[in-house]
Image (tube, coloured by chain):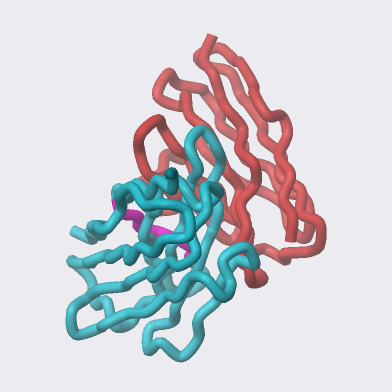
Chain colours: A red, B cyan
């Protein structure tokens, strides 16, 4: 299953709300996760089962969607949100990741 | 705390072999599936392989089938990735990651080990 993400890069200001879209080449039902990766670090799980917030993740981060189209929303953007965000499907083998969306803070 | 520590990376010539190890702690290792995920320099994430808790099922991305073998030793809380016929395209950071339970995907990751395939 191929995953695409848009945009590939986005630049936004502190306090903004941003959306990242992930599209799958075939349905993954709700088995879609979102990760954040900062430079030199391993990825951190943010959202799983499309919309469930992982433990310790702030509620200003949310996920939605099902089937082939999903959205990650970050509200009240903070400087610490500067990172690359990846979607990940785990409905089918082989598991796959999207190409990533780089979020920059203006 | 849940922790995974990968070792075994290094510089290897094209066509060579390498064995990566991941030692886990802080959880009941023998009840979790484990994975290897890699990241080429400056590139995105690529899931490589997974193994179920009792080694009943192993899966691989197509690009490594027939060259890489995943295994585990639950007595040593360890998972391994044996890599043969390495090419430059196999270079990158290799992460060990735990599959969560009840629909949770890769929820804990190690810090990674760097593999460089170059002559």
Residue A103 vs residue B18, the one in the foreground: B18
Q: At 74% across and 44% down in the image, what residue appears? A: A4
Residue A87 vs residue A29, the one in the foreground: A87
Residue A38 vs residue A47, the one in the foreground: A38
Q: Is residue B107 magenta?
A: yes
The quarter of the picture where the N terminus of chain A appears is bottom right
Residue B35, by quadrant, is bottom left
How many numbered circles does the render carry? 0
Where does the image place residue B105, in percent across and percent down from the top left? 49, 63
Where does the image place residue A52, in percent across and percent down from the top left? 53, 56
Q: At 50% across and 64% down in the image, what residue appears? A: B85
Q: Is residue B84 above or below residue A42?
A: below
Q: Is residue B50 above or below residue B6?
A: below
Where does the image place residue A54, in percent across and percent down from the top left? 44, 53
* Residue ranking furthest to the front: B119
Q: At 43% across and 73% down in the image, what residue appears? A: B101
Where does the image place residue B38, in percent across and percent down from the top left? 47, 52
Is residue B22 shown left or right of residue B98? left
* Residues shaded magenta: B104-110
Is residue B37 shown left or right of residue B66? left
The quarter of the picture where the C terminus of chain A appears is top right
Q: At 37% across and 79% down in the image, what residue appears? A: B71
Q: Is residue B56 above or below residue B109?
A: below
Q: Is residue B17 magenta?
A: no
């Amino acid at each position: 299953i191929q995953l695409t993400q848009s945009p590939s890069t986005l630049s936004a200001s502190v306090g903004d709300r941003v959306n990242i879209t992930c599209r799958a080449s075939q349905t993954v039902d709700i088995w879609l996760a979102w990760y954040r990766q900062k430079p030199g670090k391993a990825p951190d799980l943010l959202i799983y089962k499309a919309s469930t917030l992982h433990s310790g993740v702030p509620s200003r981060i949310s996920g939605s969607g099902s089937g082939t189209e999903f959205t990650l929303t970050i509200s009240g953007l903070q400087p610490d949100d500067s990172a690359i965000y990846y979607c990940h499907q785990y409905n089918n083998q082989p598991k796959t990741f999207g190409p990533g969306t780089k979020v920059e803070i203006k | 705390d849940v922790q995974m520590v990968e070792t075994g990376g290094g510089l290897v010539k094209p066509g060579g072999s390498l064995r990566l190890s991941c030692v886990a702690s802080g959880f009941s290792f023998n009840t979790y599936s484990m994975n290897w995920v890699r990241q080429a320099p400056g590139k995105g994430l690529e899931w490589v392989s997974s193994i179920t808790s009792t080694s009943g099922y192993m899966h691989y991305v197509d690009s490594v089938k027939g060259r890489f073998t995943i295994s585990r030793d639950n007595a040593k809380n360890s998972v391994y990735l044996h890599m043969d016929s390495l090419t430059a395209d196999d270079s990158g950071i290799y992460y060990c990651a735990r599959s969560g339970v009840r629909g949770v995907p890769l929820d804990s990751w190690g810090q990674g080990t760097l593999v460089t395939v170059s002559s």
